[in-house]
Amino acid sequence: FHTQHPQHSTHALRKRKIRHIPVLCGWPIPRRDLADQADKYAVTILALFRPWNRTVDCVLKAHNVTWCDALIHHLSTLPPHHLKVINHMQEQWECKLAADDFSALRRK
């Protein structure tokens, strides 16, 4: 925490030795291939993969930049293993859609 943070002297952040998968509450991760979900997708990916806080120097995006443009810029700075995780998030949607299509065909 920054020295101005109220929990600076009592709390600490540390890197976990064992990897954990975060469980997201709320809406599911939006699809990247739907135009009407583009902003929601950009906000979600930025919140998960870009370090941020409420200070002016560490926000998710600048005021004069769209969410989609901020995401495009940030994706170019991510390591390959983060990009792989992001692509797997989209593959989950594709697998669900394929399963739904297959179920619909079997019912006919």
Image (cartoon, helix red, strand yellow):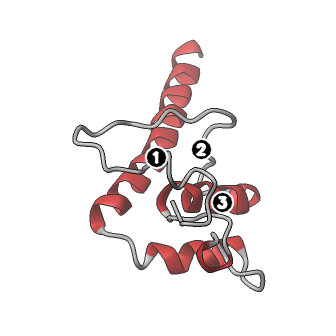
Please name the residue that numbered disc 1 is placed on. Answer: 89
Q: CA distance from mark 2 to mark 1?
A: 8 Å
Sequence-wise, the earlier of marks 2 and 1 is 2
- The front one of 71 and 88 is 71
Quadrant in the picture for residue 68: bottom right
| Above or below: residue 79 compared with residue 41 | below
> What residue is rendered at 63% in x and 63% in y?
42
> What residue is rendered at 61% in x and 59% in y?
5
Tell which residue pokes out farthest to the bottom in this image.
Answer: 64
The amino acid on which the numbered mark 1 sits, given as a three-letter code, is Met
Element type at mark 1: helix
Labels 3 & 2 near each other (Cβ < 8 A)? no
Element type at mark 3: helix
Rendering coords of residue 50 (x, y %): 50, 65
Sequence-wise, the earlier of marks 3 and 2 is 2
- The front one of 72 and 60 is 60
The amino acid on which the numbered mark 3 sits, given as a three-letter code, is Val
Element type at mark 2: loop
Labels 2 & 1 near each other (Cβ < 8 A)? yes
| Above or below: residue 4 compared with residue 93 | below
Please name the residue that numbered disc 3 is placed on. Answer: 43
> What residue is rendered at 68% in x and 78% in y?
56
Specify few, some or many for label 3: CA neighbours under 10 Å numbering under 14, 14-19, or 20 or more: some
Please name the residue that numbered disc 2 is placed on. Answer: 29
Rendering coords of residue 36 (x, y %): 76, 57
Q: CA distance from mark 1 to mark 3?
A: 14 Å
Q: CA distance from mark 3 to mark 2?
A: 10 Å
> What residue is rendered at 63% in x and 54% in y?
6
Labels 1 & 3 near each other (Cβ < 8 A)? no
